[in-house]
Image (tube, grey):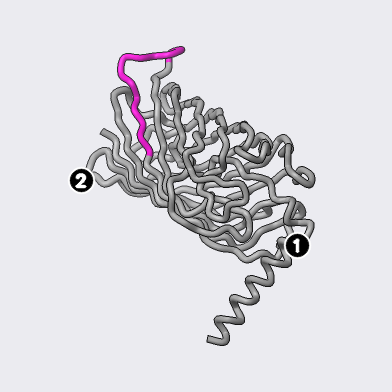
Amino acid sequence: MASLVTRIGVHVLALFLWLSSPAAAQAPIAGNYGIGAGLGQTSAILPPPGTRVIENGWIAYSIDRFVDDEGKDIGAPGGDVHAARLAFRYVFPGIEILGADYSAGLVLSYRDQVLRPAPGSGTAYQQGDSVITPIALGWHMGAWHTQVSYSIWVPTGKFEDGGQTNTGKGLWSQMFYVGTTWRQEADLPWAATLQARYETFGEQKDTDIRPGDVFSLEAAVGKEVVPGLSLGVLAATSFQVSQQSGTPGGNPEKYRINVAGGEIVWKPSSLPGAQVALRVGKDFDNRNTTEGVASLLSLAYAF
């Protein structure tokens, strides 16, 4: 019992020291898109017209530390973030725009806090922010596949200014996406994907803070090693291209996130259209945000 009390006291003291330091005002609001959450070896391939896709994903993010604008540990205790998402997508048959297939989608989430929270945040499972993708276009040219899309983040999650258990960010955002996948035409193909995202934000409710625009670049490469089973590696970087504005006490420096990891994808032959994917990524050399290890277990079914 004494050791437990000591550990709790150390964490409380570390948090108090952090909150009373200048660094406490220098953590910018992170983008809504969780870097790597939509990345895979073939993630830029739009399914054939008439396809419906339902996906359920479970995300766990273990925060090792919080870092400042030089990448140094600020001493605040880490923690764990858990979230679930339910995604729907439909590729409309008989509709082509600029020679591309047309799709739309929706993502709902349920979580215990935002993905990259401020130090000292509490946890309470509630609905998170939602994503509407009114338009996604996909082109297919042999082994090459290209997709562009436009998405809107809707502030359906709980947000209170200064709240310790927020599951949303209290703002709207827009994201523009372009991605290309090359998939070898072979029995056990190689595949590679490169995709870019640009996210821009409205003002946060009750605070008038406007986060800086975020650019993300993601890449993946992998191979189907046996029928139905693919292994791959992933890498991504995400950073603010403009500075946050409206922050009381002065605007923080921009943040940067780097991630590297791997992916396993299984498509069981006994259940056509089903896919199970596990992705694990580790942060490195980040600035003004968190560092840790994230994992995503995704179950999808296309029909």
The kind of secondary structure element at disc 1 is loop
Query: Residue under circle 2?
Result: 270
Q: Is residue 90 magenta?
A: yes
Q: Position of residue 62 (x, y in %)?
A: 53, 60
Q: Is residue 279 above or below residue 151?
A: below
Q: Are marks 1 and 2 in contact (CB under 8 Å)?
A: no
Callout in the foreground (1, 2): 1
Residue type beneath disc 1: Ser
The kind of secondary structure element at disc 2 is loop
Quarter that holds the C terminus: top left
- Mark closest to the chain's N terminus, 1 or 2: 1
Q: Is residue 119 above or below residue 92?
A: below
At 35% from the left edge and 45% from the top edge, which residue is drawn? Answer: 56
Residue type beneath disc 2: Ser
- Name the chief secondary structure element in magenta: strand
Query: Residue under circle 1?
Result: 20
- 29 sits left or right of 92 in the view: right
At 78% from the left edge and 47% from the top edge, which residue is drawn? Answer: 249
Q: Position of residue 150 (x, y in %)?
A: 51, 26
Q: Is residue 100 above or below residue 157?
A: above
Q: Is residue 230 visible?
A: no
Per the rendered image, the range of residues in magenta is 87-99
Q: Camera-side residue: 200 or 72?
A: 200
